[in-house]
């Protein structure tokens, strides 16, 4: 073969490889491995999130990495949220603010979060309802209303039972960052009682007692996931949202005692 033709074919091969790389999604070659997306989520939801990610990654060439912490803190720290793809929160107001700030492209209501009263094993203070949480000597844990949904709705929960935050202020011994911290405080005996999301309290049912709040005087909050405007791969982020909203994702949430949403896919 003439030397000039060999050189020409070599040049065309190099150009073709470069064009293929340029046209690949985000300039990635197959050897680079799966797409990676980052999810910010409250630690309270670690159990179903971990299981969902395992199932999702078996079916997609997408790896989901998770940062756990209070959703209110993620919203306040613009640098980390500016580098992520998804935010899972128990507080619709957090997502409202993020959307107003142009940080959220889309959001989905995945499940309903129902509060229960979690008390120490044996229920030594004989707690039967929210009204009993003002009893003298009871050590109460509440969540920071700036960081998490359970903290934000706590005043409304007390108000639904004729109480104010001031009425129970003397009993408060712990202000937690998440529902997971509340549940652990009661399970470890650091507090006598707390109002906690039911699926989170269920994780400690062998070390505490759970007391239902009547539906007519309870305050339900949505579990919501949002696609961040800063996402690195919008298609991959939306694929994970669709998985959580689909049958398998909903089955996982149900197994972990999350209340379903009527009409969801």
Image: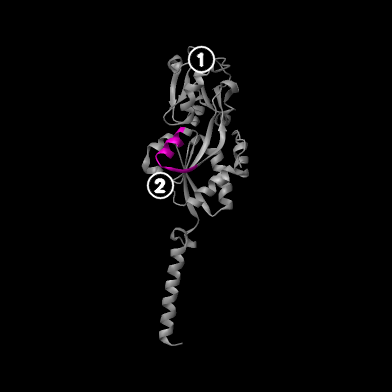
Give the quarter of the figure containing the C terminus: top right
**Residue for badge 1:** 162
Q: Quadrant of residue 197?
A: top right
| Label ID, residue 207 | none
**Residue most extreme to the front:** 100
Q: Nearer the viewer, residue 211 or 151?
A: 151
Q: Residues within 10 Å of mark 1 (few under 14, many from 20)?
A: few
Q: Which of marks 2 and 1 is nearer the N terminus?
A: 2
CA–CA distance in space, label 2 to label 1: 43 Å
Q: Could you say where residue 145 lies in the image, as x and y percent from the top left?
A: 43, 27
Q: Could you say where residue 54 lies in the image, as x and y percent from the top left?
A: 56, 47
**Residue for badge 2:** 83
Identify the residue at horizontal 52%, vertical 48% (top origin).
Answer: 238
Decide if residue 70 is in sight here: no
| Range drawn in magenta | 93-106
Question: Is 103 one of the magenta-colored residues?
Answer: yes
């Amino acid at each position: 073969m003439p030397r000039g033709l060999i050189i020409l074919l070599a040049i065309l091969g190099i150009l073709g490889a470069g064009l293929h790389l340029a046209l690949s999604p985000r300039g990635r070659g197959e050897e680079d491995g799966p797409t990676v997306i980052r999810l910010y989520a409250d630690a309270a939801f670690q159990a179903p999130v971990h299981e969902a990610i395992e199932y999702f990654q078996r079916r997609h060439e997408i790896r989901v990495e998770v940062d756990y912490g209070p959703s209110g803190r993620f919203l306040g720290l613009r640098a980390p949220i500016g580098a992520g793809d998804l935010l899972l929160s128990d507080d619709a107001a957090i997502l409202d603010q993020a959307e107003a700030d142009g940080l959220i492209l889309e959001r989905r209501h995945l499940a309903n979060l129902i509060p229960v009263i979690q008390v120490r094993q044996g229920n030594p203070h004989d707690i039967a309802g929210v009204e009993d949480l003002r009893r003298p000597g009871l050590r109460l844990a509440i969540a920071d209303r700036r960081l998490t949904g359970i903290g934000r709705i706590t005043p409304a929960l007390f108000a639904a039972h004729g109480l104010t935050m001031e009425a129970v202020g003397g009993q408060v011994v712990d202000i937690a960052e998440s529902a997971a911290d509340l549940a652990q405080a009661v399970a470890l005996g650091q507090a006598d009682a707390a109002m906690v999301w039911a699926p989170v309290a269920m994780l400690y049912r062998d070390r505490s007692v759970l007391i239902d709040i009547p539906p007519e005087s309870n305050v339900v909050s949505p579990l919501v996931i949002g696609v961040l405007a800063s996402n690195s791969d919008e298609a991959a982020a939306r694929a994970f949202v669709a998985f959580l909203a689909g049958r398998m994702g909903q089955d996982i949430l149900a197994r972990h005692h999350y209340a379903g949403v009527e009409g969801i896919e």
